[in-house]
Image (tube, rainbow, N blue to C red):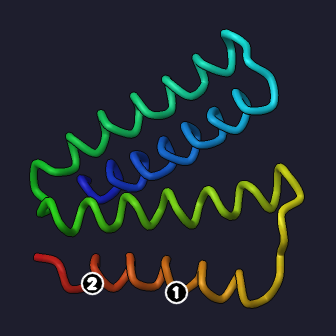
Amino acid sequence: MDWILLVVAGFGEVLGVIGINKINTRKSLGAYAWMAGGFLLSFLFLTLAMRTISMGTAYAVWTGIGTAGSAVAGMILYGESREWRRLLFIAFILGAAMGLKLISE
């Protein structure tokens, strides 16, 4: 169950980063609320996940989901590059996160 919470935390991180981009394009109360809500969700679920997942593993997986998810969101929402090498390295990030899950207690 805590691994599901960790994945939710990673997606919250992505929402927070999308909020930052919204603030950069148009400062509004809604954009600030989006960013704050995403990061609040992220930190809350990360905290809950760390009840049973070690700090180092949880943080590495959380940042991996946030990094890869933000890159993919940029491609989908903002037309960022979809070059095959970029996709390959995003896959490496996700593969490393899955590897940490497989070797964790």
Residue at the image point whose x is 14% and y is 59% from the top: 55
Which labelled disc corresponds to residue 65?
none
**Residue 75 versus residue 22 in the image, above or below:** below
**Residue 86 versus residue 53 in the image, above or below:** below
Q: Amino acid at mark 1?
A: Phe
**Residue 31 versus residue 92 in the image, above or below:** above
Determine the residue located farthest toward the top in the rendered image.
29
Residue 47, percent across and down? 21, 41
Left or right: where 13 falls relative to 31: left
Residue 4, percent across and down? 35, 54
**Res 35 quadrant in image:** top right
Residue at the image point whose x is 58% and y is 83% from the top: 91
User: Alpha-carbon neighbours of circle 1 within 10 Å: few (<14), some, or many (≥20)?
Assistant: some
Residue at the image point whose x is 43% and y is 47% from the top: 8
**Which sits earlier in the primary sequence, circle 2 or circle 1?**
1
Left or right: where 43 falls relative to 54: right
Query: What residue is disc 2 on?
Result: 102
Residue at the image point whose x is 52% and y is 86% from the top: 92
Of the two numbered discs 2 and 1 in the rendering, the one whose residue sits closer to the viewer: 1
Helix, strand or loop at mark 1: helix
Left or right: where 64 falls relative to 32: left
Q: Amino acid at mark 2?
A: Leu
Residue 13, percent across and down? 48, 45
Query: What residue is disc 1 on?
Result: 92
Q: CA distance from mark 2 to mark 1?
A: 15 Å
Q: Nearer the viewer, residue 16 or 44?
A: 16
User: Alpha-carbon neighbours of circle 2 within 10 Å: few (<14), some, or many (≥20)?
Assistant: few
Helix, strand or loop at mark 2: helix
**Which part of the image, by quadrant, shows the C terminus?**
bottom left
Asked if the residues shown at circle 2 and circle 1 are in contact, with their CB atoms under 8 angstroms apart, the answer is no
**Res 30 quadrant in image:** top right
Left or right: where 74 falls relative to 97: right
